[in-house]
Amino acid sequence: MSQLKLEKTGPLNNKQIIARLAEYYPLARTSLNHENPFQLLVATILSAQTTDEQVNKITEKLFQDLPTAADMAALEPVDLEPYLKSCGLYRHKSRYLVKTAKIITEHYLGKVPEDFNELVKLPGVGRKTANVVISSAFNKPALAVDTHVFRVSRRLGLADGKSTLEVEEQLKEVIPAAEWKDIHHRLIAHGRKICQARNPQCESCFLINLCQYARERNSKK
């Protein structure tokens, strides 16, 4: 790796990173199973501290029995808990989901709001969840920053923010709005497949010559 020619971080480098991610992950999309905006909202809330694979196992039965906000709103949190027991923080999430379902049913006529500021008012919904729903359910420009997006974008040098909000704002500055949804899914795919948190597969990475993290590792050799 010490002989590797590494490109400097800059606008051209960023464009190359974005283009190469698009080439390698052209069909990247959310792995959370859903059939409508409400189901995506529920699945995204459940995904906190839980893998998407586990969430899909939970929602297979959950959405079969409770496919709409009105169905879930009719329950008490204790009634929802048996569906979520294999999910991290399931008691908290049961309370959030029932409250959110009631609000959507009573104040939004059963439809998930498309506005960011309205979404983040819902129990259990933060910036990431709101942006996921806006981009993936409503196909509007939004850039959700989860742990994978935060880690990978900082390693690549696309951002250097210390918080998810800072990273989100920085990514929006260097990436066209039309690509926010796709870059979110592509950075997640790269983080899961190659750029893992504890053991990144740098030597087999197609971005190694463009990566700030690789450049720093190389300088220490």
Image: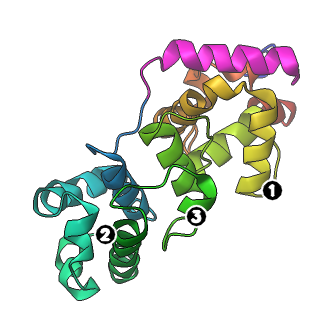
Residue labelled with disc 2:
87
> Residue 22 in magenta?
yes
Mark 3 neighbour density, 10 Å: few (under 14) some (14–19) many (20 or more): some
Q: In the figure, 98 relative to 48: above or below?
A: below
Q: Position of residue 199 (x, y in %)?
A: 56, 44
Q: Quick check: 194 left or right of 27?
A: right
Which comes before the other along the chain, label 2 or label 3? 2
Amino acid beneath label 2: Cys
Residue labelled with disc 1:
162
Which comes before the other along the chain, label 1 or label 3? 3
Q: Nearer the viewer, residue 24 or 207?
A: 24
> Residue 111 in magenta?
no
Q: In the figure, 174 relative to 70: above or below?
A: above
Q: Position of residue 201 (x, y in %)?
A: 56, 32
Q: Residue at x 76, y 58 (%)?
A: 163
Q: In the figure, 122 relative to 19: above or below?
A: below
Labels 1 & 3 near each other (Cβ < 8 A)? no
Amino acid beneath label 1: Lys
